[in-house]
């Protein structure tokens, strides 16, 4: 599939040495501007197909047609090295939306703008600085949300539009070390598409516009704390192939090569828990899980499951068997 969140491209200077935190298809830690190691053909193909946003669409179990748009991208604003490590400002965009052609479906859409700073510790690698994980992201969040909800006793859904402000922190792992440790070394996937991350965010609602005389569900206007666990991992047990890739003849001091494992299936998972801090609302949970077949192109078969509630709004249960389209590379 792809990594949905791109590591920053950060330029800094330490004693005249240029440091570049480059995005890699494995979600690897930032590396100094040294001669790059050659990449195995499978990894090169994954990097070429990488895209921060995707659109899943297709028939659902109830016979309707559904769609899910989601993804995020981070744009670097520079960076500098301080005593405690590398600190880098960036601005992020995130979108999450679900749709169903049923007139009574509870569609939803959310858009976030996130100015943030990241912090990563530094070590020395071949005489040059090298960042090590995990990364810490501290961010503000300006979020616009649209949702539909069903009032008790009403035949047609109501609609609500909201603006929220929030802030939080995200802990992001940057390597696959430990995740595939239970596999033999030569069978371990060499890529980490979306590094596992754990995010805590506090939201307060700034404005709410709803249908006239609508009775909003409990929790829609409450202040909340959210915890989100997110990752995109290669499934290492289905249809994988392992081969020994020789290093190129002109590889220089960083020959690369070695065993590489390619697997056709990836697991994309996002689990969100919401706890109101005001009002009488209860804790809510939302799950969004997809299994994607890596066909090598922009269009890929996908099975996606999405269900639960988030910040007072109930999501339609979607079990979608369709096609995923990667775009906005």
Image (cartoon, rainbow, N blue to C red):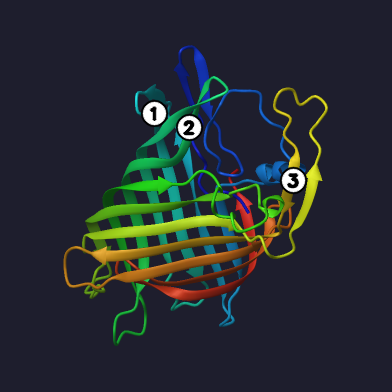
Residue furthest to the top in view is 16
Q: Nearer the viewer, residue 233 or 112?
A: 233
Tell me the element at label 3: strand
Image position of 299 with respect to 25: above or below: below
Disc ID at residue 131:
2
Q: Which of 320 and 117 is in front in this view?
A: 117
2 or 3: tag closer to the N-terminus: 2
Point out residue 149 in the picture as x, y percentages from the top left corner.
34, 74
**Left or right of 287 in this view: 273:** left
Q: Distance between the residues labelled 2 and 3?
A: 25 Å
Point out residue 123 in the picture as x, y percentages from the top left corner.
47, 28
Quarter where residue 187 is shown: bottom right
Point out residue 175 in the picture as x, y percentages from the top left corner.
54, 44
Residue drawn where x is 39% and y is 28% of the image:
85
Quarter where residue 153 is shown: bottom left
1 or 3: tag closer to the N-terminus: 1
Q: How far apart are marks 1 and 3 (CA)?
A: 32 Å
The residue where tag 1 is placed is 85
Image position of 247 with respect to 58: above or below: above
Residue drawn where x is 56% and y is 40% of the image:
28
Mark 1 Cα shell of 10 Å, populated few (<14), some (14-19), many (≥20): some
Quarter where residue 237 is shown: bottom right
Quadrant location, the C terminus: top right
Disc ID at residue 259:
3
**Left or right of 244 in this view: 122:** left
Disc ID at residue 210:
none
Point out residue 101 in the picture as x, y percentages from the top left corner.
52, 73
Q: Distance between the residues labelled 2 and 1?
A: 8 Å
Residue drawn where x is 52% and y is 18% of the image:
18
Quadrant location, the N terminus: bottom right
């Amino acid at each position: 599939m792809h990594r949905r969140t791109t590591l920053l491209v950060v330029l800094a200077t330490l004693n005249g040495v240029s440091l570049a935190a480059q995005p890699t298809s494995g979600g690897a830690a930032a590396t100094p501007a040294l001669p790059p190691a050659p990449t195995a053909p499978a990894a090169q193909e994954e990097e070429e197909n990488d895209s921060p946003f995707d659109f899943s669409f297709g028939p659902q179990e109830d016979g309707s047609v559904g769609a899910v748009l989601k993804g995020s991208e981070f744009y670097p604003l520079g960076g500098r090295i301080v005593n405690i490590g590398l600190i880098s400002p960036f601005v992020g965009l995130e979108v999450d939306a679900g749709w169903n052609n049923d007139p009574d479906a509870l569609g939803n859409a959310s858009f976030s703008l996130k100015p943030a700073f990241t912090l990563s510790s530094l070590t020395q690698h071949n005489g040059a600085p090298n960042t090590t994980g995990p990364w810490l992201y501290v961010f503000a969040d300006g979020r616009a949300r649209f949702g539909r909800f069903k009032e008790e006793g009403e035949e047609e859904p109501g609609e609500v539009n909201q603006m929220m402000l929030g802030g939080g922190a995200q802990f992001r792992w940057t390597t696959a070390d430990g995740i595939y440790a239970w596999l033999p070394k030569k069978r371990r996937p060499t890529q980490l598409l979306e590094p596992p991350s754990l995010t805590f965010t506090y939201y307060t609602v700034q404005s709410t516009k709803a249908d006239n005389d609508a009775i909003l569900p409990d929790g829609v206007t409450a202040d909340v704390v959210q915890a989100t666990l997110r990752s995109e991992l290669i499934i290492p047990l289905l249809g994988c192939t392992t081969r020994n890739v020789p290093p190129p003849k002109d590889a220089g001091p960083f020959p690369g090569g070695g065993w590489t494992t390619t697997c056709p299936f990836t697991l994309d998972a996002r689990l969100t828990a919401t706890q109101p801090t005001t009002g009488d609302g209860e804790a809510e949970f939302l799950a969004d899980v997809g299994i994607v077949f890596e066909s090598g192109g922009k269009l890929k078969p996908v099975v996606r499951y999405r269900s639960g509630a988030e910040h007072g709004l109930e999501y339609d249960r979607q079990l979608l068997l369709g096609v995923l389209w990667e775009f906005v590379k």
